[in-house]
Image (tube, rainbow, N blue to C red):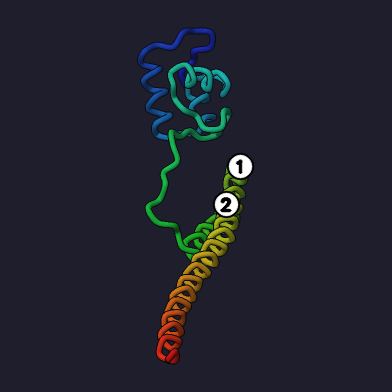
Amino acid sequence: MIEMKGKPWSPEQEFLLKELVEAKKPLRDIADQFGLSQDAVQKKCDRLGLEVVGGKALTTTTSIVMPEELPSVEEALLMLAGALKAACEPGLDKVEVQRLQVIATLARTYKEILADYLDYRGLEVELLEINKKYEEFTKKSQGTEAKSVP
């Protein structure tokens, strides 16, 4: 542990802080390593322009990576199953339990939203097919009317 309460940060300590944040280490672990409060580390991160999501978040990150394709319902259920299995492990601390709860909630929510999205996509396909059939019917009807008019 680096003891530095009440002392200015050295360039080496700032470099180490940047590395730890970029490695997405938990804020509490970073604070413990420097012998400081999470608030002190958060303030230093703010001054250095390092983004710690959620203020006093327990983990650090710089951005959310957007997937190229939507995960399937099966993938969401696998995440949910993984969180369930991990939650059964003995000795989990409060933070890990909260993290697993978030994963489970997000997986469930994603599954529900994905199901709605797939329903909308299905309806859209059906509507396009009906539109196409209507156009064909209209063309046939107009052709029939033209032949029956003397």
Q: Secondary structure at mark 1?
A: loop
| Label 1 crowd bin: few (<14), some (14–19), many (20+), radius 10 Å | few
Q: Secondary structure at mark 2?
A: helix
Residue that numbered label 2 is attached to:
106
Look at 43% across and 29% down and name the residue there.
21
Look at 53% across and 64% down and name the residue there.
120
For marks 1 and 2, the one nearer the N-term is 1
Residue 99, given in percent of the width and then of the height, sits at 58, 45
Depth order, front residue of 132/34: 132
| 124 to 40, vertically: above or below | below
User: Do labels 1 and 2 touch, CB within 8 Å?
Assistant: no
Residue that numbered label 1 is attached to:
93
- In the visual, does 26 lie left or right of 20? right
> Which residue, as the protein is rendered here, is positioned at the far top?
7
Depth order, front residue of 25/92: 25
Real-space Cα distance between discs 1 and 2?
A: 20 Å
Looking at the rendered structure, the kind of residue marked 2 is Leu
> Residue 38's quadrant in the figure?
top right
The numbered mark at residue 143 is none
Look at 44% across and 21% down and name the residue there.
49
Residue 127, given in percent of the width and then of the height, sits at 50, 71
Q: Quadrant location of the C terminus? A: bottom left
Depth order, front residue of 75/96: 75
